[in-house]
Amino acid sequence: MTLVRFAPSPTGYLHIGNARPALLNALFARRHGGRFLLRLDDTDRARSTEAFAQAAREDLAWLGIVPDLFARQSERKAQHDAAAERLKAAGRLYPCYETPEELERRRKRQLGRGQPPIYDRAALKLTAEERAALEAEGRTPHWRFLLEHRTVAWDDLVRGPAHIDCASLSDPVLIRADGTYLYTLPSVVDDIDFGITHVIRGEDHVTNTGVQVQIFEALDAAVPVFGHHNLLTTADGEGLSKRLGHLSLRGLREAGYEPSAVRSLAVLTGSAESVRAVPGLDELAQLIDLSEISRAPARFDEADLDGLNARLVHEMPFAAAANRLREMGVPDERADAFWLAVRANLGKVSEAAEWWRVVEGPVTPKLDDPALIEAAQETLPAGPFDETTWKTWTGEIRARTGAKGRALFMPLRLALTGLDHGPDLAGLLPLIGRERTLARLAGETC
Ligand code: GLU
């Protein structure tokens, strides 16, 4: 059975760039009847926090992603240690004693000679006595994975046939001198233990894949299918970092964007599909075929969020807005009619609060055409008002005054709402009601 994972490090809030792999995994699982694991890559204890871990779960839930499985790397150290021991026993993980300064000097020397700055495996040649002497000096080793100098090839879900020449890479450090793991090995061990079938992640991990495929093989495990998608960048091609607070998922949520708008932008940018407002996850899952994702960077324009959001709100069924309308104080029995009256005028659902204020008051009427207002007062139909009242009423006023178009509607709008723009008054009038309409026509703030 298909099992995918999204594996953020809880060292910051998730942003729209992280939403892309999260969604591509979740949509892939949906398309293939598979499951989704949320794995927190929290081996960096100094930078990972519980608050960010909790926030990641909340932000994914807001996006509509509810993981089927959950894991934390920090709770799986025993398994990581066991795998490290196996690699050591097989001679694939070897101790190195160089300090960062020594490595840097060596790197500069290599570059000076026009050689690629690849780790020279000097530590592999140390005798047992030399190692003992270094340890007696107080040095503790970091551990490198001995790469086989060969090309690792795979059929990438996004990029098609892909390969990495591992002869051009330094043996990667898997364990730091303080005994903590870099992400590389724990990720493979966890992918093996959970039975991950597809690893879908950003193309910044392509080189890691060359290394990690060798680790899967060294641990005698089946290698999952890999897919590397292009990364979301800003319009001028800049990468997104966790520090871009306003593009964090919570920042976007607080700014009042719909999760569906964020999803549409995060996923459709840089895909074969045009960026458009797609309300549901299932619809989005049907649209996204990983093999059709572009290889060029996925440049997005955050200004597009406003347009996408507005389109989603204009079509949004009442049920999707009901809770928020209740929180704004719109009573349930009028909320449905209110929503249908105002949604076409909203960029964000939160703006409905302002129109509810216009319905309930206080509104300070602007009366700038006394003759027309007088005719309006005299012809106001008896209640209760319904959606035909506006047409009947304005027909009467037109017959009396000869006013039409803007000259007819604008004075009424200014009197009833105090504003020169807003939703269609045919829908608002029954909500404002007869009594309040009369009071506003009389110039009362109410
Ligand atoms: N924690 C890694 C990251 O955030 C996960 C990469 C992967 O999916 O393997 O980049």
Image (cartoon, grey):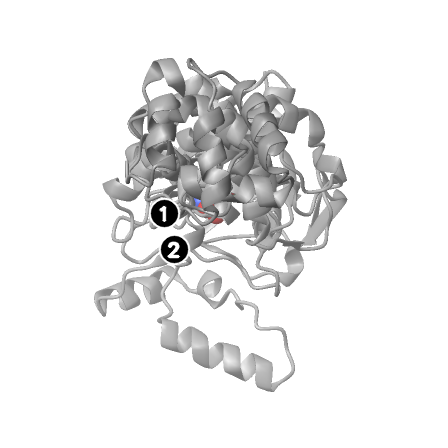
Q: Residues within 10 Å of mark 2 (few under 14, many from 20)?
A: some
Residue at mark 1: 13
User: Which quarter of the rendered picture does the C terminus lie within?
Assistant: top left
Compute the Cα span from label 2 to label 1: 8 Å
Residue 204 sits above or below residue 314 on the image: below
Q: Which mark is residue 1?
A: none
Q: Residue at x 27, y 56 (%)?
A: 178
Horizontal placement of 70 versus 110: left or right?
left
Residue furthest to the bottom: 112
Check the image and report above or below for 173 versus 353: below
Q: Amino acid at mark 2?
A: Gly
Quarter placement of the N terminus: top right
Q: Is residue 26 above or below residue 52?
A: above
Foreground pick, 124 / 403? 403
Which residue, given by chain and number where applicable, does mark 2 sit on?
245
* Residue 257 placement, left or right of 409: left
Q: On the image, which quarter does residue 438 sit in?
A: top left
* x and y percentages locating residue 330 in the rendered image: 33, 24
Q: Nearer the viewer, residue 399 or 56?
A: 399
**Circle 2 — which element?**
helix
| Residue shown at 34% from the left, 37% from the top | 442
Q: Position of residue 365 (x, y in %)?
A: 36, 43
Secondary structure, mark 1, is loop
| Type of amino acid under label 1 | Tyr
Q: Are marks 2 and 1 in contact (CB under 8 Å)?
A: yes
Residue 200 quadrant: top right
| Visible residue check, residue 121 | yes
Please tell me how many numbered marks the rendered image carries.
2
Q: Which numbered disc flags the more N-terminal residue, 2 or 1?
A: 1
Q: Residues within 10 Å of mark 1 (few under 14, many from 20)?
A: many
